[in-house]
Image (cartoon, grey):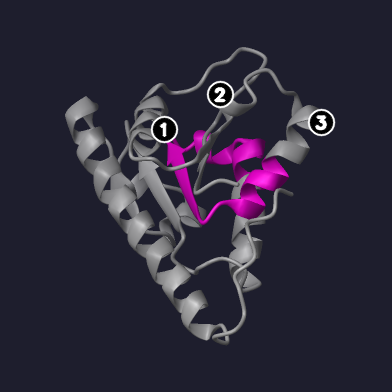
Amino acid sequence: GYDIFIAINYDPGTKEYNKTADRLYERFAAQGSRVFFAPVEIPDADDIEAEPHVYRALSSAGQMVVYVSSADDAKELRLINALGRYHALVSAGLKDENSIVVAYSDMSADELPAILKRYPSFFIKGSEKAEESAEETLAVVVDADTEIADEQAESLPEEQEIAPESTL
């Protein structure tokens, strides 16, 4: 399973995407998080090949970071589809309501589409700022995961064991 799902505008045919997202991925991975990041996990997968991987990643990830660098990024079908599916899991109570975070660069907060303005967001500018922002976001992710795990553990009867994570 994954700790974090990074949703980006990524075209596997051209392998084009804003490389600022790499810094988010590298920072989260360096901190020990298991990160689903399409350019790394499924770099050549078309929509049909990607589907089972994306489904498993969305189901297991405890946090989604949506990265956009333009209003057009937020219109990209794969990104919107992943966000919609993850949001449905949140709405169904299967994911924490604060588990979606938006990271953006090369645009202002005012340019974020309405669908993304409902989530906490942070601006990435330059590599140093990206690392600071990613570190702050990671702290939020880790704190949220710890709180969720603690709450789940507290709600279990004492004699019940926690089953290992399943691999979907």
Residue 65 inside the magenta-drawn segment: yes
Report the side of 12 relative to 123 (left or right): right
Q: Residue at x 46, y 70 (%)?
A: 148
Badges 2 and 1: C-beta atoms under 8 Å apart?
yes
Q: Residue at x 61, y 56 (%)?
A: 86
Q: Which residue is mark 2?
A: 39
- Lower position in the chain sequence, tag 3 or tag 2: 2
Distance in Å between CA atoms under marks 3 and 1:
24 Å
- For the record, the magenta segment spans 54-81
- State whether residue 97 appears in this view: yes
Q: Which residue is mark 3?
A: 48
Distance in Å between CA atoms under marks 2 and 1:
10 Å
Three-letter code, disc 2? Pro
- Report helix, strand or loop for mark 3: helix
Q: Nearer the viewer, residue 22 or 110?
A: 22
- Lower position in the chain sequence, tag 2 or tag 1: 1
Q: Which residue is mark 1?
A: 25
Report the side of 26 relative to 92 (left or right): left
Please say if 131 is above or below 146. Answer: above
Picture quadrant of residue 103: top left
Badge nearest the viewer, 3 or 1: 1
Three-letter code, disc 1? Tyr
Three-letter code, disc 3? Ile
Q: Residue at x 71, y 37 (%)?
A: 53
Q: Nearer the viewer, residue 33 or 4?
A: 33
Count neighbours of disc 2 (C-alpha within 10 A) and say few if under 14, some if 14 to 19, many if 20 or more: some
Q: Position of residue 151 (x, y in %)?
A: 46, 78
